[in-house]
Amino acid sequence: MAGHRIFAMSFASIYPHYVTKVERKGHPVAELHQVITWLTGYDDAGIARVVADEVTMEEFFAAAPRWNPNASLITGVICGHRVEEITDPLMQKIRYLDKLVDEVARGKKMTSILRGDTEVPQAS
């Protein structure tokens, strides 16, 4: 999937869709931010900054303050593909985030979404 067009899309163009998805299902944006922070290490200010700067998805993941070592525990199907079988590392990270957003929207318990972590690590 090298050179996939989503890599060059801005995080700012995708983020509102994440917000709409979780809010439409009755969940607060804070839960969305919690899973983004858990996965990438971006805090609220960092998320606002990457949205304002319109960084690409590739840049968003490359500059992530702290990639969660438990990300590989994210499994399941997203967009018709098993996330654990995606071979392109960047596409897999994008789909990990998509999967987490879906789980928030579906109302899954946060401890389950965060793969058993009881707290979200702070961005460094």
Image (cartoon, rainbow, N blue to C red):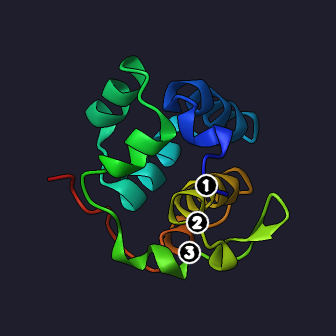
Residue 70 visible from this viewpoint: yes
Q: Residue at x 58, y 62 (%)?
A: 96
Please state which amino acid type lies under the numbered disc 2. Answer: Asp
How packed mark 3 is, by other alpha carbons closer than 10 Å (few <14, some 14-19, many 20 or more), is few
Identify the residue at the far left of this view: 124
> Split into 4 quadrants, where in the image is the N terminus?
bottom right
How packed mark 2 is, by other alpha carbons closer than 10 Å (few <14, some 14-19, many 20 or more), is few
Identify the residue position indicated by label 2 in the image. 88
Q: Residue at x 26, y 62 (%)?
A: 121
Disc 3 element: helix
Please state which amino acid type lies under the numbered disc 3. Answer: Ser
Sequence-first tag of 1 and 2:
1
- Image coords of residue 39 (percent x, y): 42, 60
Please state which amino acid type lies under the numbered disc 1. Answer: Ala
Left or right? Give the position of 63 relative to 78. left
Left or right? Give the position of 103 relative to 52. right
Identify the residue position indicated by label 1 in the image. 2
Q: Residue at x 37, y 34 (%)?
A: 47
- Image coords of residue 59 (percent x, y): 39, 40
Marks 2 and 1: in contact by CB < 8 Å?
Answer: yes
Q: Is residue 114 above or below residue 100?
A: below
Q: Is residue 76 above or below residue 18?
A: below
Q: Is residue 103 above or below residue 9?
A: below
Out of 86 and 100, give the one closest to the viewer. Answer: 86
Query: How many dots with numbers?
Result: 3
Disc 2 element: loop
